[in-house]
Amino acid sequence: MTDAPPSTVLADETAYSEAVQLAVDSSAAYYADGTSTLDDDAYDRLVRGIEAYEREHPDQVLPQSPTGKVAGGAVVGDVPHTVPMLSLDNVFGAEQLADWAASLERRIGRPVTAWCVEPKLDGLAISARYQRGRLIQLVTRGDGVAGEDVSHAMGTIVGLPDRLADAVTVELRGEVMMTAAQFEEACAKRQAHDGTTFANPRSAAAGTLRTRERPYVCELTFFGYGALPALDDTSELAEGLRTWPHGKVMGWVAAQGVQTTGATAVAGVVVATLEEVQSRVEEIAAARATLEFGIDGIVVKCDLATDQAVAGFSSRAPRWAVAYKLPATEKITKLLAVEWNTGRTGVIAPRAVLEPVELDGSIVTYATLHNVADIARRGLMLGDSVTVYKAGDVIPRVEAPVVHLRTGDEQPIAIPSVCPSCGDAIDTSQERWRCVRGRACRAITSISYAAGRDQLDIEGLADNRIQQMLDAGLISDFADLFYLTREQLLGLERMGAVSTDNLLTAFERAKAQPLSRVFCALGVRGTGRSMSRRIARHFATMQAIRDADALAIQQVEGIGPEKAPVVVAELEELAPLIDKLVAAGVNMTEPGVSGVSSPDSVAPSEELPLAGMSVVVTGAMSGPLEELSRNEVNALIERAGGRASSSVSTKTSLLVAGEKAGSKRSKAESLGIRIITPEEFATQVSAFL
Ligand code: IVH
């Protein structure tokens, strides 16, 4: 699926020894408190460069070289591990995974028929020692042989209980990390304390775990991935933990009240074939962006204890497991500037301008900064090195400044005191700042959006006309268009009788548009063309939409608990505009839909050719679909009973791929999703064209 990132090229011995020093320093900082100067990708490239150089020049290998060492040889501690805490070897794609599996099977001397596939959690390894069911000690991985006692963190780690369900003596191994919410909270606490912040959840977890005395307590999260009985324990349970398949061991761990990934969307599964391993890898990769915690790959393990025993260990890693690395989702780059824009709804949003950086397959130049409070919370400054996160289809975001990389030249970010669009005052009473004029501030943008091809489709209403009408005080929102008289229009400069009549006809036509378009024209946040269609279909009338509370809105496919209250609040705010539209005689119903979707009214749609299917369209359309805009193709999908979606995931049922289809096609291929041409698709839905 992915190739290994290219390695740093080391030209000579000096470059090699500098690279070794950089890797040693960086790894020491990474494992100490997460303050490495290199992001994961840069560190990986460096170590590969070092490895390549050492292969060519085995006589020049420096003793402090990080290659072949656990944690790059970074950390030592004084609590010996009962069994070494090792690293994992990496693979970077399906082919390398197959090579690894083949060599493993050769070593074992038989095919492996049970594989465990789990997310690779991006945190810090920890050993949690329980005696007769009580948590007595926490030890970091350290150099793998001995780690540091971090028992002071007991009681602050969600998922790692002080007591197990049974009074058993066992060592649990797993990863300590911060969820997105815990990270936010930790940053806010640190910000309030010393004005700085953590660069990312991983370094926040590392810093928090290793700091004994902090004036504030930050919560951490634990996910277990292994259990070891004491070496001399001969109890039935100890025998079980030594001989059960890994999946069963993890079931036991969860039953003890310890958190595992079992309850998450990326739960570990046991599968029989390498093809199934690969497809679970793809599923986990696809779910990555939606997770509340960071993963940087997938761990593939032999499930059976007998296979593990025969495969054994190298000095650095078990031979029975491998880490399938996923592309980095986070990089360090520079914050060059902050731009301020007022959106259609009057919200004033900052946007980061970055030194371009390649991230998860695309070049990121801009990233969201959410709002002013967010900038303050993160203590960002212009010129800061910042961590930028992007995975899958998510909008890239600036996570935090890398405080220890500051040079002293950083400048405060100028916060606007007036609306950047109209110069009027800013309403700062909420976290999301808004121009006091609200939607009226960007009236031209919202009216032009409402008149657009996918909304009311008012032909002949160019932006300069709208501006003219706004300037003349004839309109202040798009509902006012329907109250314009012939005389008023004729009174405008450069407006003849023919254009006036054409425009009036266009307004009349617009009034009869279906509810889905009228609703879309309102520009409710998060409801574009497809979502508006779904809402209109679900409720059938504007009145029903307005009567719906957040719970009722959530019944619409694709609207979750976060979006639903936003829709309700926006509709409340838009009430005067909607009332004006109703009074002007604008259609407020969806043709062909009888009422709020009930199991009965849903039934007929099950006979539609795309009923229950999630369809993604990519590439250039051809054949009967050639002339259709993407929106029109999406409308076609919905008419035929399907749901149009813009990104390929495990939920996708069908990909319509035209010429020049790119990453969506390869993703669908790897997920085994059915792919058809625009022509085939047109045949399938011809009745709805
Ligand atoms: S099993 C002998 N399972 O990855 C090591 N490790 O790069 C076997 N990790 O030190 C560990 N998620 O900290 C295992 N599901 C998982 C994991 C996992 C994250 C970490 C762990 C390990 C590191 C190796």
Image (cartoon, rainbow, N blue to C red):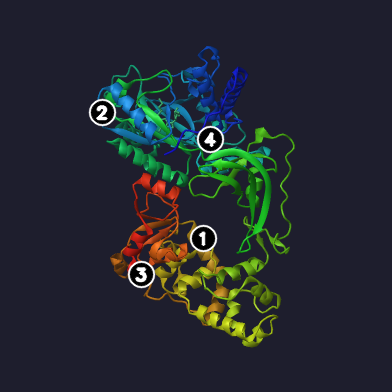
The residue indicated by pointer 3 is 688
Which label lies toward us, 3 or 2? 3
Q: CA distance from mark 1 to mark 2?
A: 50 Å
Report which quarter residue 280 is drawn in: top left
Residue drawn at 44 percent across, 52 percent down: 661
Tell me which label, 4 or 2, sits earlier in the chain.
Answer: 2
The residue indicated by pointer 1 is 526
Q: Amino acid at mark 1?
A: Gly
Quarter, ligand 1 = top left
Left or right placement of residue 241 versus residue 288 in this view: left
Q: Amino acid at mark 2?
A: Pro
Q: CA distance from mark 3 to mark 2?
A: 51 Å
Q: Amino acid at mark 3?
A: Phe
Residue drawn at 35 percent across, 29 percent down: 99
The answer to whether residue 309 is seen in the rendering is no
Whether tag 4 and tag 2 are in contact, CB under 8 A, the answer is no
The residue indicated by pointer 2 is 111
The percent coordinates of residue 56 (x first, y second) are: 51, 18
Q: CA distance from mark 4 to mark 2?
A: 37 Å
Residue 202 badge: 4
The answer to whether residue 253 is seen in the rendering is yes
Tell me which label, 1 or 2, sits earlier in the chain.
Answer: 2
Q: Residue 458, relative to residue 16: is it above or below?
A: below
